[in-house]
């Protein structure tokens, strides 16, 4: 069980939260992370309610929760009602605003500010609203990674023999195969930051206008970008790309290191080894799998699992241990430090990289007479756990810095749990699909960005929302919240 560390910051209080929300409708707008937040907040209040129902308002639905005061140690009185507008992405289909069968399928155009705010009632409506708004930070990625993925979507560049023939570092080669100059200012991370600033500052001003034009009946709260804990493959980052990619723990760095790993293993391998590696990995191209989980595309969590075994195989103690680590053959035993990509160090020399990986894949991919193939490789070595990054994650990422700056300028409250979640890498699902999710199903994505829905996992958000609403009610410009100071901990 997870809980908030009560060190003067208080504890989440459902009754107090419902009082602060008042007789208003709660809108939670943004990308896939907001669907998790909606589920967490609405369900906590729902469990404390004595009655509830779903109501349809036009083309949208809302959950109505009602709390009886005397059930919560309060004097008898009328029920406290809160309406929770169901996020459009939870049920809408097609290419409409907010469309998609779930939030993870939303494209960048569906995440624009105008789309989300166009769903809101007018500010002069009698019904007040509480808007928790995320400007979709996950889509504000680096121009380099966006261009690399676009290049890989072209079949001829993703085809394994063509990918293998690229010079190192492969990300730069892919970028320059797609556009003329990848070293200019347009491919620096600052270009992504400038673009995101225009989005988040516009969002903050819109939330401020919502409050002002409703005479204070409505409140807009800006959500800070969530914390991610994606592990990068050790030794497979190149200096040229790292200065242009998103920060430590990001999905970008994870995928970039996996692509570097794949290129290092293919680059000096002969044609036969390339075909065998592709067969064991179950891939036809270097194009990474998306959230749809395409079966023939490159799965980064599989590369991470094999890379971890390669690191174990390079260690004498691991080579003497039992189990999968015994897959280290003579090829793996010959490993020594060598350049994997320009300027980067790896435990595996390029000349032996393919042989080492193949020795592992042959061992874990054959489980009995006549039973072999990529299905067994996935089951044995696919990574399913995230990684503690507390010692290397920044105090605030560049997105959070911009969000706080925009909120201060527009005088809107923020829901900030970055530091609270910074050390909690284990709050991520690791593998989507619940506790019984199959590693064989690639649509069960390797996920170190979204939070699990374990009981207590969203205590920080509950308390953070209470502080944000208190800040809005007091009309203060203060942007420091208790949620940035006290981390979650496990309850004894």
Image (cartoon, rainbow, N blue to C red):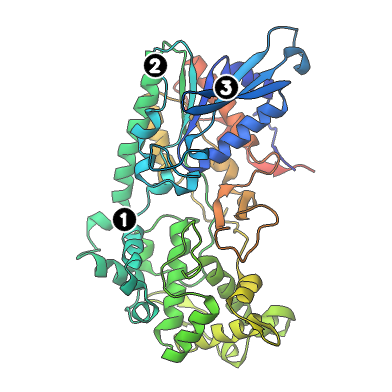
Q: Tell me the mark number nearer the camera, choosing from 1 and 3.
A: 3
Residue 471's x, y, as percent? Answer: 51, 21
Q: Quadrant of the N terminus?
A: top right
Q: Residue at x 69, y 18 (%)?
A: 67
Q: Could you tell whether 424 is left or right of 117 in the image?
A: right
Residue under label 2, please give it: 123
Residue under label 1, please give it: 143
Q: Residues within 10 Å of mark 3 (few under 14, many from 20)?
A: many
Residue 1 higher or lower than 218, as above or below? below
Q: Quadrant of residue 363?
A: bottom right
N-terminal label among 1 and 3: 3
N-terminal label among 2 and 1: 2
Q: Could you tell whether 95 is left or right of 7 in the image?
A: left
Q: CA distance from mark 2 to mark 1?
A: 36 Å
Residue under label 3, please give it: 83
**CB-based contact (under 8 Å), mark 1 and mark 3:** no
Q: Could you tell whether 204 is left or right of 1 in the image?
A: left
What SS does tag 2 mark?
loop
Q: Residues within 10 Å of mark 1 (few under 14, many from 20)?
A: many
Residue 88's x, y, as percent? Answer: 48, 35
Q: Quadrant of the C terminus?
A: top right
Q: CA distance from mark 1 to mark 3?
A: 40 Å
Residue 257 higher or lower than 458, as above or below? below
Q: Residues within 10 Å of mark 2 (few under 14, many from 20)?
A: some
Q: Quadrant of residue 47?
A: top right
Q: Could you tell whether 38 is left or right of 179 in the image?
A: right
């Amino acid at each position: 069980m997870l809980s908030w560390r009560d060190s003067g910051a208080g504890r989440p209080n459902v009754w107090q939260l419902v009082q602060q929300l008042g007789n208003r409708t709660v809108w939670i707008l943004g990308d896939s992370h907001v669907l998790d937040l909606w589920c967490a907040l609405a369900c906590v209040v729902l469990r404390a309610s004595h009655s509830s129902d779903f109501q349809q308002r036009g083309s949208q639905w809302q959950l109505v929760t009602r709390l009886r005061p005397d059930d919560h140690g309060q004097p008898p009185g009328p029920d406290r009602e809160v309406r929770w507008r169901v996020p459009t992405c939870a049920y809408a289909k097609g290419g409409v605003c907010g469309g998609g069968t779930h939030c993870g399928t939303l494209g960048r155009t569906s995440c624009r500010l105008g789309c989300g705010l166009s769903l809101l009632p007018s500010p002069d409506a009698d019904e007040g609203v509480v808007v928790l708004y995320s400007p979709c930070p996950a889509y504000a990625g680096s121009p380099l990674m966006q261009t690399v993925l676009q290049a890989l979507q072209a079949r001829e560049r993703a085809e394994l023999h063509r990918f293998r023939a690229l010079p190192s570092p492969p990300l730069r080669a892919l970028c320059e195969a797609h556009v003329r100059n990848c070293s200019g200012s347009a491919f620096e991370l600052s270009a992504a930051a400038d673009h995101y600033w225009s989005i988040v500052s516009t969002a903050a001003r819109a939330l401020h206008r919502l409050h002002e034009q409703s005479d204070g009946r409505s409140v807009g709260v800006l959500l800070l970008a969530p914390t991610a804990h994606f592990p990068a493959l050790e030794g497979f980052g190149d200096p040229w790309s790292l200065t242009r990619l998103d920060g430590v723990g990001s999905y970008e760095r994870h995928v970039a290191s996996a692509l570097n790993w794949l290129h290092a293993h293919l680059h000096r391998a002969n044609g036969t080894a390339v075909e065998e590696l592709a067969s064991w990995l179950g891939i036809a191209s270097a194009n990474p799998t998306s959230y749809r989980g395409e079966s023939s595309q490159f799965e980064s969590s599989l590369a991470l699992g094999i890379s971890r075994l390669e690191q174990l195989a390079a260690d004498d103690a691991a080579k003497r241990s039992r189990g999968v680590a015994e897959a280290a053959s003579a090829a793996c035993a010959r490993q020594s430090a060598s350049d994997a990509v320009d300027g980067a160090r790896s435990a595996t020399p390029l000349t032996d990289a393919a042989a080492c990986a193949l020795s592992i894949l042959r061992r874990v991919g054959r489980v009995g007479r006549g039973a072999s193939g990529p299905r067994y490789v996935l089951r044995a070595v696919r990574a399913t756990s995230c990684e503690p990054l507390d010692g290397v994650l920044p105090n605030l990422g560049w997105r959070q810095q911009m969000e706080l700056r925009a909120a201060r300028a527009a005088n809107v409250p923020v829901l900030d749990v970055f530091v609270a979640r910074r050390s909690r890498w284990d709050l991520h699902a690791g593998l989507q699909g619940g506790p019984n999710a199959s590693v064989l199903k690639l649509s069960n994505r390797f996920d170190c960005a979204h939070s699990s829905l374990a009981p207590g996992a969203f205590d920080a958000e509950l308390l953070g929302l209470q502080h944000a609403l208190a800040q809005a009610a007091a009309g203060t410009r203060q942007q420091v919240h208790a949620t940035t100071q006290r981390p979650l901990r496990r309850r004894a």
